[in-house]
Image (cartoon, helix red, strand yellow):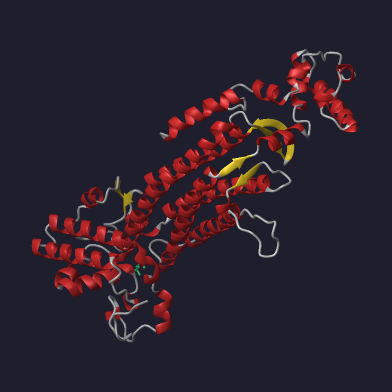
Amino acid sequence: MQDQDQTSATPSAWSGRFNEPVAELVKRYTASVSFDQRLAEYDIQGSLAHANMLHAVGILNAQNLLSIQTGMATIMDEIRSGQFLWSLDAEDVHLNIEKRLTALVGDAGKRLHTARSRNDQVATDVRLWLRAEIDNITPLIKNLQSALLNLAEPNAGTVMPGFTHLQVAQPVTFGHHLMAYFEMLRRDGERMIDCRKRLNQLPLGAAALAGTSYPIDREMVARELGFDGVCANSLDAVSDRDFAIEFTACAALLMTHLSRLSEELILWMSPRFGFIDIADRFCTGSSIMPQKKNPDVPELVRGKTGRVNGHLVALLTLMKSQPLAYNKDNQEDKEPLFDTVDTLNATLRIYADMISGITVKPDAMRAAALQGYATATDLADYLVKKGLPFRDAHEAVARAVRHAENRQCDLSELALDELGQFSNLIDADIYEILTLEGSLNSRNHIGGTAPEQVLKAIKTARKIIGD
Ligand code: ARG
């Protein structure tokens, strides 16, 4: 960190009340500028809206407003070009900017903080920043959904084993399987948008905690900053970070969904399954085992999910038992939140690209679906449709499966008279039912795995995301 103050004895914004300068170690411990400088542009945006309002209600004269605007433009340039000298002595992003403003424009800079506090200022900055990040993230979710649709469409009829307990259960299509993740991401996207609605309320005006004695116009500031309204209670406005927790919870769920898909990609890519191949650019080799191609990206997504879940717990723990109103604890909200956003951004970008680079191996998927008696339920349903109570049908088919297992063959490979030993309701038409395609096609209703339904679901999905 560059330090524009020459000595630690430089008075801080609040040192007037103290008899000795703050200890060096404490200064480092309490400063947040090393990370909260990330909020700088939103801090300036908030300050400009505040200054406009102070002028409109007659607290700040036109000359002062102009000085603040000019000074802030210079500061914005300095920050963007990397020229700005961030100072540890000025503690945080807010005081750094205010101090520089005063150095540039004099008294007008000192008047900016009228009718506000860093408490409502920081709450506003974080909301503005997070709102912009949510607006960056939602299109990334859509991109990933679109990549899933592009892989699902040509595989709407690609048969694979569907699993429960990771045991072969019933045949499904690969397209149908991928569409399950589309649905998860759809809810994740909706949750983000919902979170944005709740966070889009203006804290400024709450001042330190109780409001302010100046004749401020909060609605004007809210309008200028694009908030839907103002926080209705000043104590709540400066103290709660529920919006950050809610966002992180949405992010943790999204990552959890991607960690599930990652786990499947890892399994499917292992030679034991051999269902897919992931493009080389998402994998690494081993320095000792020449044959290895490791699915590093999905493994890391799985790992980084732990990191985001950790941030959620950190933020919940940070908030837990805090008395009203603002407490310095809240300064600790930023790093977990920033890291959550960074992790989510990078993961969503890389994931869409990785999904587009997947090669499907339909023969291996089909071969796996043919093992494990995936159509046993279809045989039971066939018997039920011929009048047998389901429990009896279940019992008859279980015995047939045991028989086929001893013979080491599939149900469809048993001769009609062999199958007939288990129920006299079984006729030659059973062989259509026992095929993988027969099983798939019979599940032809909304949400079912029949290829026709999967294609319909993909079409609807494209409409939903405007693809
Ligand atoms: N850096 C502080 C934070 O992030 C800003 C608010 C500080 N307010 C205070 N009264 N010390 O929360």
Q: Residue at x 31, y 65 (%)?
A: 118
Q: Can residue 3 be seen here?
A: yes
Query: Between 312 and 232, which is closer to the camera in this rendering?
Result: 312
Q: With respect to residue 342, does 464 lie above or below?
A: above
- The picture places residue 457, in percent across and down from the top left corner, at 53, 28
* Res. 300 image quadrant: bottom right
Residue 191 as seen in the image, left or right of residue 15? right
In the rendered image, which quarter is residue 290 located in? Answer: bottom right
Estimate the x, y position of residue 123 in percent, counting from the top left: 35, 59
On the rendered image, what quadrant is the C terminus found in?
top left
Tell whether 62 sits left or right of 157. left
- The spot of residue 91 in percent (x, y) is 34, 74
| Residue at screen point 27% across, 59% down | 211
Quadrant in which residue 408 is drawn: top right
Residue 353, image x and y in percent? 50, 47
User: Is 109 left or right of 459, judged from the image as shown?
Assistant: left
Quadrant showing the N terminus: bottom left
Determine the residue positioned at 69% across, 43% down. Answer: 274
Which corner quadrant of the figure contains ligand 1?
Answer: bottom left
Q: Nearer the viewer, residue 40 or 10?
A: 40
Look at the image and tell me whether residue 210 can be seen.
Answer: no
On screen, 304 above or below 169? below
Count of numbered circles in the view: 0
Q: On the picture, is 192 further left or further right than 105? A: right
